[in-house]
Structures are given as structure tokens and as C-alpha cells.
Image (cartoon, rainbow, N blue to C red):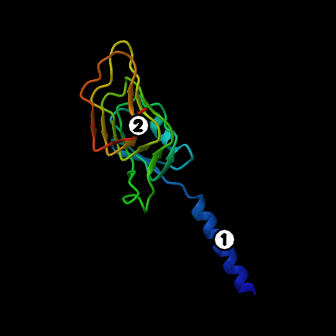
Amino acid sequence: MKTKLFFSTLFTLIIWNVQAQMGVVALHKVGEVQYFSTSNAFILAYASAVTGDTIYLPGGTFTPPDIRKGIKIFGVGHYPDSTAATNATIINTHLNVGHEADGLHLEGLKIMGNLSFEANAASGISNLVVRRCFMQNITASGSNIHNNNLAINSIFAAQQV
């Protein structure tokens, strides 16, 4: 009887521990790596990043900050056959990109809304790369010219009305 109680308690603790684990977001800066594992890890990593840094997102669902820095953001992908072990990296809403984000690189993300470029009166967004991402659509506000932006091997799932 004591053995059954011991193993059932041990099993419950193991399951509880596995469910409590979250993916770790890694921020790579010049000469150092920082790890974030809270429920808002992406937002904290972004707040600590500067232009030129790289953020690695694991499989899971993330609420994004407004992107206003020229950083690189890598997820694990969005195809079910490729992400069976890790799950997809999902951005759970629109991803807003400000005009200060020249040089932004997005790869391996499933964006559940639009990728939206915001522009100011002086300039648009330049040198953006969106590679192997899924999103509803890309939208750009303002009348400014957006230069040298690439969407490579990405899926746009907007429905035509």
C-alpha cells in the first residue's frame, strides 16, 4: 500500500512539474546570452535588446511587444510536420513594426494576425526580412515608401471578400 501511495505521489509531482515548465526565450547580445522564462518572456527579452541583437523563441504562444528595433527574431517554425516535437512559435495577435525597426529579421513565426508596418512622416521601413513565416497579411500605414523589404518562403492566408 505504501509503495502505491509513494509512486502515485511521485507520478503526480512529475506531471505537475512538466506542465509547469515554460519554454525559455534566449536573447543573444554581443558577448553574452540572457535567458527569460516567465509568462511574458518575449516582452522582457525585447525590452533588454538593442538594435543588432537576436531573440530566439521556443515553441509556444507569445504576446508580442510593438517592434521598434532592428533585431533578429527566430522561432522554431509553423508547419505541423516540422514542429511536432517543439510545437509552433505562435504570435497570438497582430505584430506591429514601427519605423525605427530598419533591418528587422523575422523567421519561423506563426503570426495569428497581420504584420503591420507603421510609418512616420519622414520615412518608411527599410531592409526588413520575413522568412518562413505564416501571417494573415502585411499592411503598411501612411504614404511613405518602404524600401528593400523581403518576404521569402512565407505564407499569407488573408481571405478575399
Residue at 52%, 40% (x, y): give it.
63
Helix, strand or loop at label 2? It is loop
Question: How far from the left and from the top, in percent, is residue 122?
Answer: 34, 13
Residue at 38%, 60% (x, y): give it.
81
Q: Is residue 101 left or right of residue 2?
A: left
Alpha carbons under labels 2 and 1: distance apart: 44 Å
| Residue in the foreground of this view, choosing between 90 and 156 | 156
Residue at 63%, 64% (x, y): give it.
16
Q: Are marks 2 and 1 in contact (CB under 8 Å)?
A: no
Question: How far from the left and from the top, in percent, is residue 38?
Answer: 56, 48
Residue at 36%, 44% (x, y): give it.
133
Q: Tag 1: Cα neighbours inside 10 Å, few (<14), some, or many (≥20)? A: few
Q: Residue furthest top?
A: 121
Q: Quadrant of the C terminus?
A: top left
The image quarter containing residue 154 is: top left
Q: Which one is earlier in the sequence, the residue at label 2 or at label 1?
A: 1
The residue under label 2 is which amino acid type?
Ala
Residue wearing tag 1: 12
Residue wearing tag 2: 158
Helix, strand or loop at label 1? It is helix
Q: Is residue 85 left or right of residue 30?
A: right
Q: Quadrant of the N terminus?
A: bottom right
- Any mark on residue 54, and which? none
The residue under label 1 is which amino acid type?
Thr
